[in-house]
Amino acid sequence: MKKQLQIIGSGVLMVTVVAGSSLPAAARAQVPQATPNSAPAAAAAGVPLPAGYVIGPEDVLNVVFWRNQEMSGDFVVRPDGQISMPLLNDVAAAGLTPEQLREVVTKAATKFLEDPSVTVVVKAINSRKAHITGMVQKPGPYPLMAPTTVLQLIAMAGGLHEFADAKKILIVRNENGKQVAFNFNYKDVSQGKNLKQNIELKPGDVVIVP
């Protein structure tokens, strides 16, 4: 911009600013710059991950490609363990850590992008659940966001029903494609006896209270 000086009346000096010229460098530095269309997508805030966490069905993942909003977004892991992504189609996610999935997605994206930069954030963990059924106050699925024992799960479910057979509780678990069962005697554990049966639950465990 240019400044023009004029004398008005009794020697009063007036400064007129004329648009069209460039600002000094120091002033230009304070002017906000326009955001380009290819602005980088921001990664969403994630949830704290339990020790040994791997991605599972129903988990919600936020996958961000640097400077590519079209391929970025939130993706829910399907029951078959895969997520559907633009251009990449189906990508196997279940059983991987977020870092391992990031590597898989980055490699697949090299077919479409030059030197892709990918971030994977877990927004919601819905796969780590144990179920309790039978004679408890609140049967149903419960999230395993921290180490949880059988006794703790029973407490989360509101405790045993008055007609429950507390000596014959059963924990059913899938191990290597086979079902195994563990016995749990609530009365013994509540009295500090045979505490080794108060095992830590794993995702997919079912506690049956007859």
Image: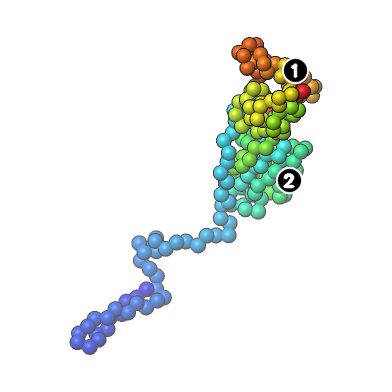
Indicate the quadrant containing the C terminus: top left, top right, bottom left or bottom right.
Answer: top right
- Which residue: 47% across, 61% down? 33
- Spot occupied by residue 148 in the image (x, y as percentages of width and height): 62, 25
Looking at numbered disc 1 in the image, what kind of residue is underneath it? Lys
- Looking at the image, is 193 positioned above or below residue 139? above
For residue 122, what is the image quadrant? top right
Q: Secondary structure at mark 2?
A: strand
Indicate the quadrant containing the N terminus: top left, top right, bottom left or bottom right.
Answer: bottom left
Can residue 205 be spotted in the picture? no
Q: Nearer the viewer, residue 122 or 127?
A: 127
- Spot occupied by residue 186 in the image (x, y as percentages of width and height): 68, 18
Q: Earlier in the sequence, mark 2 or mark 1?
A: 2
From the image, tell me which residue sits under label 2.
84
Can residue 208 be spotted in the picture? yes
Label 2 crowd (10 A; few <14 / some 14-19 / many >=20) = some
Q: Name, please, the residue furthest toward the right.
A: 178
Looking at numbered disc 2 in the image, what kind of residue is underneath it? Ser
- Spot occupied by residue 24 in the image (x, y as percentages of width and height): 35, 66
- Which residue: 76% across, 38% down? 79
For residue 166, what is the image quadrant? top right
From the image, tell me which residue sits under label 1.
168
- Which residue: 27% across, 83% down? 6
- Spot occupied by residue 11 in the image (x, y as percentages of width and height): 20, 85
Q: Name, please, the residue furthest toward the top.
A: 193
Q: Secondary structure at mark 1?
A: loop
